[in-house]
Amino acid sequence: MPREYVEGLIAYLESRYDECIEKSHEAMQRAPWFYQAKILEGDVNLSRGDQKRDAGDRDGALIEYATADQAYRMAARIGESDPLTYARIANVWKIAMFSELYGSGKDMALNRQRALDAASDALKADPDNADVHVLISNVCRTWSESEVRAGRNPEEWLDRSFESARTAIRLRPRNAAAHAVLGASHQLAAQFAIEHGQDPTPAFTQAVDELERARRLAPTHDSAIMNLANCYWALGEFQLSHGQDPRHALQAGIRNLERAIELFPGFANLYNNLGNCRQDIGVWEMAHGADPVTSFEAAVQAHTKALQLNPKHIYADGNLGNDYACRARYKM
């Protein structure tokens, strides 16, 4: 293992990305066969892309993701028998898909195919790699969400997501990531049921069960906590709109959002969803004779924080306006 690679890895862990890239280049010059140095270079670009995405710079993020893809593909040409190189390529385009889900969405189909093709190459190298099956499940689930947003039926892709997640669980029963994506897919099925006038309760129940299981297996698992929070929020919104008391679900959503914020304090969307839960509690309180001011003020604080972290967050901007409107209606 080249000394420069070790130095680059330390620089990466300390977020000294320019130095890490420089060291990875030096490692490749010393040992052209050492493809792990190119993987490290790709990891830097991926991290930079995530930072730009979280700051609202989706175009900049996609450029970084494409650069990461190039580094990983070079690594794959050298270490063609290593499934992790292909899995990293697939992960890049899975992340790009998720970024585009809240953007233009113009390249989602292309990025979906890039991700699935790379995942297929990974499975050729290691058919029983549970992590790759989880990755495929996530790709299919993200595409399913884009289908729902476009008004199309997501069931084909949800079925593929379920199948891949269950395969991963069969291969590794205590795989928190597999339970997390399985729960997130059930949550999406609940959302689709709501939009088509069907009872979402069974899907919500399955979603919460899987996501809670994932959180127990890995208490700091980011997607388990985030999806669990979103699931409770969605359940609370359904209950609120159907005359049911949503406070238990919304408070559970708040607890998990606060856990997620401890892990990712710079992620604007967590604060946006926290504000949404607070706002929904305030709406219920206002409708049932309770004082909602504390809830609305907490919603304002959360949505304001989301906009401070990402001034381009259009949902937080609109939700902040709703906070003020709700508070004004109560005081009239």
Image (spheres, rainbow, N blue to C red):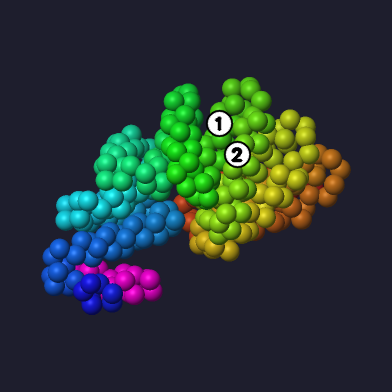
Is residue 324 left or right of 262 when viewed as pictured? right
Q: Which residue is mark 2?
A: 207
Q: Quadrant of the N terminus?
A: bottom left
Q: Would you say residue 145 is visible in this rendering?
A: no
Q: Secondary structure at mark 1?
A: helix
Spot occupied by residue 211 in the image (x, y as percentages of width and height): 59, 46
Is residue 123 left or right of 225 when viewed as pictured? left
Spot occupied by residue 168 in the image (x, y as percentages of width and height): 45, 43
Badge 2 vs badge 1, beta-carbon distance below 8 Å: yes
Label 2: how many residues lie within 10 Å, few (<14), some (14-19) or many (20+)? many
Which region shows up in magenta? 8-25
Spot occupied by residue 31 in the image (x, y as percentages of width and height): 14, 69
Numbered circle sitting on residue 64: none
Nearest to the observer: residue 111 or residue 80: 80
Main secondary-structure element of the magenta-colored stretch: helix
What residue appears at the point 44 percent right and 25 percent down from the top-left corner? Answer: 156
Q: Which residue is mark 1?
A: 189
Instruction: Look at the picture and state if 267 lies above or below 329.
Output: below
Spot occupied by residue 113 in the image (x, y as percentages of width and height): 30, 36
What residue appears at the point 55 percent right and 56 percent down from the top-left corner? Answer: 218
Q: Quadrant of residue 231?
A: top right
Nearest to the observer: residue 312 or residue 269: 269
Q: Give the number of callouts.
A: 2
Q: Quadrant of residue 330?
A: top right
Q: Secondary structure at mark 2?
A: helix
Callout 2 amino acid:
Ala
Instruction: Look at the picture and state if 186 lies above or below 265.
Output: above
Label 1: how many residues lie within 10 Å, few (<14), some (14-19) or many (20+)? many
Instruction: State which tag comes first along the sequence, 2 or 1.
Output: 1
Instruction: Look at the picture and state if 209 lies above or below 32.
Output: above
Q: Would you say residue 164 is visible in this rendering?
A: yes
Is residue 131 left or right of 212 when viewed as pictured? left
